[in-house]
Image: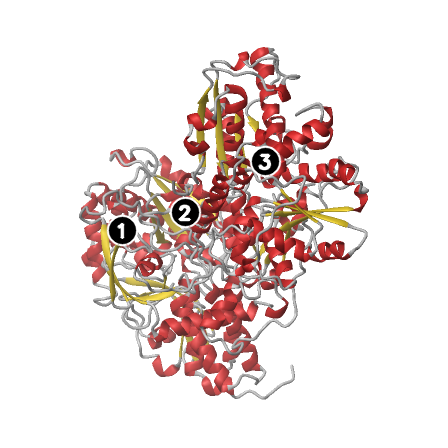
Amino acid sequence: MSEMTNPDTSRRVPASQQAMSVPVPGNLDAIGATVGVNIDGVDVKVPLGTTILDAAKQAGIKIPTLCHHADLCVAGVCRICSVEVEGQRTLQASCSFPVTTPIKVKTHTQKVRQARRHILDLMLSEHCGDCYTCGRNGNCELQTLAKEYGVDSFRFGHVEKPVHEIDRSSYSVVRDNNKCILCRRCVRTCLDLQEVGTIEVLGRSHQSHIGTFLDKPLGDVVCINCGQCINRCPTGALRANDQTDEVWAAIEDPKKHVVIQTAPSPRAAIGECFGMEPGTAMTFELNTALKMAGFDQVFDTNFSADLTILEEGTELLLRLKQALLLREPGAVFPQFTSCSPGWIKYLEHFYPEYIPNLSTAKSPQQMFGAVIKTYYAEKQGIDPKDIVTVALMPCSAKKFECNRPEMADSGHKDVDFGLTTRELAKMISEAGIDLPRLPKSDFDSPFGTPSGSGVIFGATGGVMEAALRTVIELVVGVKVEDLFEHADIKPVRGFEGVRYVELAIPQVGPVPDLLKPLFPSWDFLKGATLKVAIAHGTANAKKVMEDIKAGGQFSKCHFIEFMGCPGGCLGGGGQPIPTTPEIRQARAKAIYAEDSAYEIRKSHENPDVLKIYTEFLTEGPCGHKSHKLLHTHYTPRGKYIE
Amino acid sequence: MSSIQTYTQATPEAGLKRALGMSRPDIIHEMNESGLKGRGGAGFPVGGKWNFAASAKSEKKYIICNADEGEPGTFKDRVVLQEHADLVFEGMTIAAKAVGSREGILFLRGEYTDLREHLEDTLQRRREQKLLGDNIQGSGVDFDIRVFIGAGAYICGEETALIECLEGNRGEPRNRPPYPVNTGFNGHPSVVNNVESLASAACIMGRGADWWKTMGTAKSTGMKLFSISGDCARPGVYEFDLGVTVADILKEVGGEGAKAVQVGGASGRCIPPSEYARSIAYEDIPTGGGSLIVFGQQRDMLDVLENFMDFFGDESCGQCTPCRVGNLKLLEGVKLLRAGKCSMSYLKELCALGETMQIASKCGLGQSSPNAFLSVVAHFRDEIMGRTYSQA
């Protein structure tokens, strides 16, 4: 399945930010369906409407780009990709010029090289960047271009001192307009890819800058903290709020017991920060590295992902029982997943009236924090105030989530620090650890049993697949393998923006002991059809929410998985830069491969999870103690800021 | 009494009545025959534009009159709207018939809001006279026009930025292609014509292409309106046949002995006395929007240039790098020249930058904004380089 762009929503971005799209003919052998282009003497045939840039790629010719990004609509604003087209007086931006007639293109004439160098010089004249002190040193598109085009002086001057205040008001995203080159990728990300619209271009001409509503601090406006803008910034103008110093301080404090949990997505991506091919899982090498860096314990977020399935799944079954068995009004459907903090804040802002639909289950990150500061602390005999919980997440919104005031049910802050993949990569480099060459080691007990269902949480559809695996076995009473080969529930996988799946429950099995206090039998589900859906990226979430509002197909669903970021967590705003459709595919492959390799692939079979229900959460899923520690509430925020 | 003879002499609604009785291809053919080119500055053949829009397939098509006259030194459209609004609306209605449009929009420059009442009154009267509305003059053509007030950005005179503004977005030029004649307002084919183009089109339909071709040159047919200002005895709006020389115009307006003439507004070219014998025509000195700013001997060319560059520094939409930053660098360069601090080599660098802007900017603004800089440097080098070094 290929990733879906959203043709019907592309109008969110003004047409000035779009290039012509010509529908690609179905049959490329048809007369007139393709057109010949000659680029630097190389002849290629491309579908009508292909941009010069794509045609050049096909011809194996590299054209530099800056405002172009594979995930975004075309803007044609930076002009660095200018080329000469025979017969045209002016140079043409190859990213936005569709080929509709046979043309001859030259990509590196004197005119073109001079123009590109000028454009770079102009950008550099505005860019207050001291590369040494920049987080993007070595991974900056502007820096790379400056090198490629032999920039040896600031021809048109240089900004020596910052002129814009750095906006550090957000828990998640830091904005430094001093480094901004106005490529507007962040704006297109926010407006078009995510359909949130937090940041926009304000002002005109030389005064134009990227800003928020009335230029208020980012922490005060409608921002979902997804960090997708960070992932698409070519320079260091946008970055995640760096907390590595605080984490180092905790590690070095002998009184502190520092525990880290690692989520599956960063493990599938962190290798990219060390020069490895996208899609190389580093899960067990990372365990070794974290111990070397000084973390006391390394746990697997999969444990709390599995815990989430039992809590959130039980919540769903309770809602179904309320509706189908007790026939009580007030059972709210569809139930929405609550793992993605970007999605949660999106809903709180844009659809606050749907808060009752959200599962009350905390995200795996937060569940883990609460469990570590209670169950684990008790077990180890450590005062929870001396425990520092760190979470390695693919996500910038996790930084906001762990700072939510309600996330302290253990009596302490459940999770002290949420680190992005990029931050941890930096810590590892700083410690001189050569991650790719490390030996593998296991996770620590008592939360270290590898589990496949937890791993796939990292990909869009993963939470749903994990939930369905458990529902099929616990409710229907058959092995998942009997219905889906190798227990791979393929219909919920893939990158299509919105997916809808039905699962018939023709028969029911015996209720497992764990759930007996809540459900005497499953008879009320016999003959029912479970309708579920999956959406990733808030633009797709918006489509589903609008459909629900209008009483459409998705309003009839029982359970919907929403992820704030395109591709799910593996495409999160805390992941290595760049993130592109191909890189997301590669990371997904790594995640599903890890799932396949595990012996335990169903949440309800994770022995660590079953153990916590016998030793600690003795009332079972959704019991009193679970409710106190593992569930939460939400804040209707609305779209209007006071 | 209007200074625009051609428009004053036009028989009211003669062009419209004739067009209503003609087929679409015939109207377009007549326009093509006349050789009328866009009077806003770009000089694209009017008939060609109509033809593209006519052959585009769409449920809706729009005729948009570009009355966002923002080029410094240009004010002829204001006079046309004030004195010959009927002719403009007549031209729009003819275009509607030619293209198959039911809706017209007059995009009025924000600073021209005082014209609105007059225009609305004219539109209302035309509706009452059955010159607008359903079934115009019993011809079966339905067409009406509304007035849209711009928000005061120079860039909205660029047709795609104008359309963006109409749609409620930031006024910023689009990537071209696609062109408005295919994908314009709300995605529908749209003809965007300058005020004068439409008024002249109405005259051409009334009196025929052959009459129009008796004026002007073979490549630049017809008459053109000129906004004349600056150091001359009789500034105002003038009508000249295309091909007129700069010297002839200066004589007519009382600007003989001028040190320089800026043709085509701030984005046009600065012409030195040695070139006054040249003619204003598409094949020689491009008309631009048809403005001439006369600079007397006492003018400091750096003052002139700083004024222009300051304007572009403000009015660039800020979208593309060459225009957003380039104009600023040229402005800073002018200030360096004034202070006597601009080296020959940096001036050369700035001129090269200007040439890059001309070919690498996204739209006509950035492509033409360096013209003034480059032409002043070319023709008045001694004057601008001869400044005493100052600490300021």
**Can residue A285 be seen at all in this image of the molecule?**
yes
Q: Secondary structure at mark 3?
A: helix
Mark 1 vs mark 2, CA separation in Å? 39 Å
Chain letter of disc 1 in the image: A
Mark 1 vs mark 3, CA separation in Å? 40 Å
Reading the image, the residue beneath label 3 is A350
Reading the image, the residue beneath label 1 is A47
Q: Position of residue A540 (x, y in %)?
A: 48, 37
Mark 3 vs mark 2, CA separation in Å? 37 Å
- Say which of B270 and A71 sits in front: A71
Please give the name of the residue rendered at 49% of the width and 86% of the height, measured from the top-left corner.
B344
Q: Are marks 1 and 2 in contact (CB under 8 Å)?
A: no
Quadrant assignment, res A617: top right
Do badges 3 and 2 share one subunit? no
Indicate which disc residue B106 carries: 2
User: Quick one: label 1 or label 3, which is nearer the N terminus?
Assistant: 1
Amino acid under label 3? Phe
Amino acid under label 2? Leu
| Left-right relation of A48 to A603 | left
| Left-right relation of B344 to B275 | right
| Left-right relation of A278 to A264 | left
Quick one: quadrant of the N terminus of chain A?
Answer: top left
Please give the name of the residue rendered at 52% of the width and 54% of the height, measured from the top-left corner.
A232
